[in-house]
Amino acid sequence: MTAKELGEGILGLVAMAVIAVWYFGSDDTQAEAPTVIEQELTNEQLMEIQLDKAHKQYAQAVQQKNDHHDRWLGSTHLPRVGNIRADDYLLCKREGWYRDTDEHDFCAWHASIGTWYR
């Protein structure tokens, strides 16, 4: 554990203690506790949100490409975890990120290869 991580952990504990004192130290014993309607998203749900955003960008990029723009919008929402572009391309295909679009075109766009690379 680094000193930075230790400091962040201590800061988090202090913040929770302050909130607990404020919340439980209230004089109004008749007040209802606030209802928490927050749901933690799973990794799959977060990935679906990122895929939705990426597919919107892809649709814009296809339109720009069809309009013969010199540059088009690339994906800022999908992870690039490969060492080379081919790794990103293969991951895209393996994970099915292309959804209902042409799998080669979408994944080539994501990896910036082929006709999508300039």
Image (cartoon, helix red, strand yellow):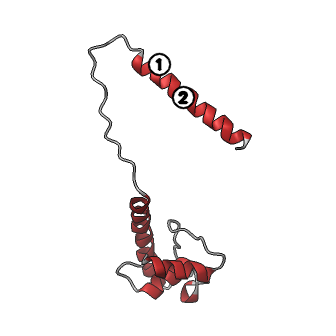
Which residue is at the far right?
3
Q: Amino acid at mark 1?
A: Val
Q: Quadrant of residue 2?
A: top right
Question: Which residue is drawn at the image coordinates 42% and 66% (left, top)?
Answer: 53
Count of labels shown? Answer: 2
Q: Position of residue 71 (x, y in %)?
A: 56, 78
Which residue is at the far front?
1
**Is 96 placed above or below 41 here?**
below
**Is 117 placed above or below 3 here?**
below
Q: Position of residue 110 (x, y in %)?
A: 52, 77
Q: Nearer the viewer, residue 25 or 98?
A: 25
Q: Secondary structure at mark 2?
A: helix
Question: Which residue is drawn at the image coordinates 66% and 76% (left, top)?
Answer: 83
Give the residue number, with chain letter if any, for mark 1.
Answer: 21
Give the residue number, with chain letter if any, for mark 2.
Answer: 15
**Badge number at residue 74:** none
Q: Secondary structure at mark 1?
A: helix
Q: Position of residue 87 (x, y in %)?
A: 59, 80
**Is 67 placed above or below 81 here?**
below
Question: Which residue is drawn at the image coordinates 26% and 14% (left, top)?
Answer: 30
Question: Which residue is drawn at the image coordinates 70% and 40% (left, top)?
Answer: 4
